Image (cartoon, helix red, strand yellow):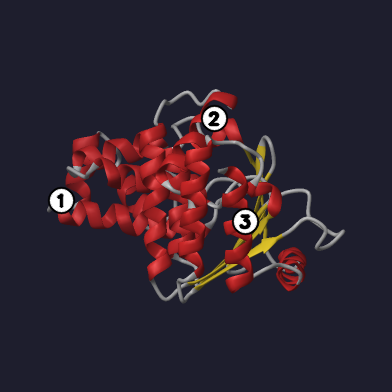
Amino acid sequence: MPGPDHLQNLGRRLRALRVGAGLAGKELAETLGWPASKVSRLELARQNASPSDITAWVTATRGSADERTLLLGLLDQAREDLRTYRQRTKHGQAPVQAGYNALVERSNIVRQFHNTVIPGMLQTPDYARAILTASSRTHEVPVPDVEAAVATRIERQRYLYTARRFEFVLAEPVLRWGLVPTDVMLAQIDRLQSAIGLPNVRLSILPFGATDDVPTHMFEMFDDLVCVETVSREHRHVNPEAQVYVETFVDLQKVSLTGEDARRFLLRISDELT
C-alpha cells in the first residue's frame, strides 16, 4: 500500500495549488473534465494520483515546473516500497530526487552509510552531474533530465543548514573508486572537509582494515525509515527490521575517523590524487 504520509502531503500541496489559483473544487474538476469527487479524493489522500493527474492539476492551477517536480517526487515516494529503478525513473531522475528531498524535509535525523559514492547531501554539482549521467546511461532512463536532477539533488543540501541532524559514514573506497575526473574529486574532497565544520553534521570515514564487519551495500535512514538501494531496486524497512540498521550504523561510527582525524585523512587522499 502507498505511504499515507506522502499521500497526505501530496493532497495538501494539491489543495494549496487549487486554493492559490482561486478555484473551487467543482471548478477545477470541470476544467479537467473530472468528476467533482475526484478532486476531493485526491486532496484528502483517498485516491492515488497518476503522473498525468499531477501534470494536469499543475497546468490548470498555473503551478510552476518546480512544483510539478516536487509533486511527482511525493507521488514517487507514495508508491510501493519495492520498486525497480526503471519504474522509478520512467518520468526522469528529477522526480526521484524530489522524493528524497521530501523524505529529508520530514525527518529530524538523517543517517547514511555509503561504500560506493559520496552521499547526495554532500555532493558538488560537478560530482552529482557525473554520477547522475552515468546512472542515466546505465539504466537507460527514458527522460533525459540530468540537469534538472542535479539541481533538485543540490537543492536538498539546504537542509544541512537547519535544525536537523545529519550523520554520514563513508567507507574509504568511496574516495578511491575513480568514478569522476581527478579535478572533480579534489573539489569534492574540499566539500567534505567543509562539511566537517557544520555544527549539525557528523562526518565519519571508515578506513580500510577498521573492521571486518562491513555492509556490502549502502543504506540511508530517515528517522525510523531505512532505504536500501541495490543495482535494480530500492527496498524500504521500518521497525523492528530497521533497528538492525541503526545498530550497524552505530557500530560503524565507533571504528571510523571523525573530526580532525577525518580531515587529515581527506587531506592525505587529496595529496595522493595530485
Give the distance between the C-alpha atoms of the residues marked 2 and 3, in whole angstroms.
27 Å
Q: Which comes sooner in the sequence, label 3 or label 1?
A: 1
Residue 267 located left or right of residue 152: right
Q: What residue is rendered at 62% in x and 47% in y?
A: 272
Q: What residue is rendered at 85% in x and 59% in y?
A: 213
Q: Check the image and report above or below for 83 versus 216.
A: above
Q: What residue is rendered at 38% in x and 46% in y?
A: 152
Q: How crowded is the residue under tag 3: few (<14 C-alpha within 10 Å), some, or many (20+)?
A: few
Q: Position of residue 222 (x, y in %)?
A: 57, 64
Which dot, 2 or 1, sits closer to the camera?
2
- Do tag 2 and tag 3 residues touch (Cβ < 8 Å)? no
- Do tag 3 and tag 1 residues touch (Cβ < 8 Å)? no
- Of residue 258 and residue 9, the one placed in the foreground of this image is 258
Residue at the extreme left: 22
- Of residue 62 and residue 41, the one placed in the foreground of this image is 62
Give the distance between the C-alpha atoms of the residues marked 2 and 1, in whole angstroms.
43 Å
Q: Secondary structure at mark 1?
A: loop
Q: Which residue is mark 2?
A: 134
Q: Amino acid at mark 1?
A: Leu
- Of residue 5 and residue 84, the one placed in the foreground of this image is 84
Q: Amino acid at mark 2?
A: Ala
Q: Which residue is mark 1?
A: 23
Q: Amino acid at mark 3?
A: Arg
Please give the label number shown on residue 207.
none
The C terminus - image quarter: top right
Q: Which residue is mark 3?
A: 268
